[in-house]
Amino acid sequence: MSSVPGVTPGQPYLFTRSYHQPWRALLVAAGGFGAAALLLFVVDATGPMWAGMPGWIAAVASIFAANAPLIIAVVAAAAFTSIVGFARATGIRHWVWTDLLYGLFVGIVARAVVELLAPTLGGFGGPLGGALSGDATLALAIAASAAVLISPIIEELYFRGLMVRALVDALSDAGRVGASIVAVTTSTAAFVLLHVVAAGSLVPVGLIIGSLVVGVGCGVLTVVTGRLWAAIVAHVLYNASGLALLLW
């Protein structure tokens, strides 16, 4: 019988080792996080410069700053610290129909929690806020596409597909439950921090609560299912529902 690299006899295929050099993968992740935080800070600090440009340019700059370093880190980690390939390392190779149900459930619960504690009142914060005052329609379309499709997928690939899975591998000696708790906690803290940086000088309470709930929910989905799709569905639904409330 053939074996899969990184799988010990009797070990469920669902929980194969994602990153064979997990600490190096986490080092790559740290570099991506630092680069994203720095770029977001620069975009926010140079806000007056963006005010004189078409709104869509500021929108693209903000989206690039938040997402480009993260996806580069994910690709680099999969290429240089894993021997199972990008799709298997991040957990997106396999899809089970229950992932959709789990994702919908967590996404709805996360949005409900946020709306109960800090109802959405409308308006975009951070660098994008100024962008929407210019070419409103185009900037809004770009921002909406990023919020519903681009950012959730890239953030899940990075925070859960890279960080959570690499941490679980790195801390395997602590047992799967212990490693999972540390992985979800650490990735959620980083997830919240990056969103706070992205918000700039205005950090709504709802943003912190939402980032915390989504971080924990998607992290738990990742370690429980061993796949990434449920987390992606939850994150996309959460962001889409938030955008709908903003535009209501």
Image (cartoon, grey):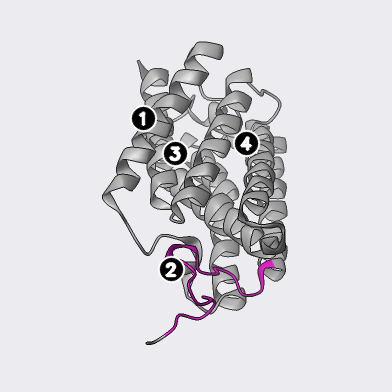
Whichever of labels 2 and 4 marks the residue nearer the N terminus, that label is 2
Numbered disc 2: secondary structure: helix
Q: How crowded is mark 4: few (under 14 residues within 10 Å), some or many (20 or more)?
A: some
Numbered disc 1: secondary structure: helix
Whichever of labels 3 and 1 marks the residue nearer the N terminus, that label is 1
| Disc 1: which residue | 137
| Disc 2: which residue | 13
- Amino acid type shown at disc 3: His
**Cβ–Cβ below 8 Å for labels 4 and 3?**
no
Q: Which of 193 and 166 is in front in this view?
A: 166
Residue furthest to the front: 10
| Disc 4: which residue | 195
| Disc 3: which residue | 235
Region in magenta? 3-22
Whichever of labels 2 and 3 marks the residue nearer the N terminus, that label is 2
Q: Which of marks 4 and 3 is in front?
A: 3
Note whether 111 is above or below 50 in the view shown. Answer: above
Residue 96 lies in quadrant: bottom left
- Amino acid type shown at disc 2: Tyr
Numbered disc 4: secondary structure: helix
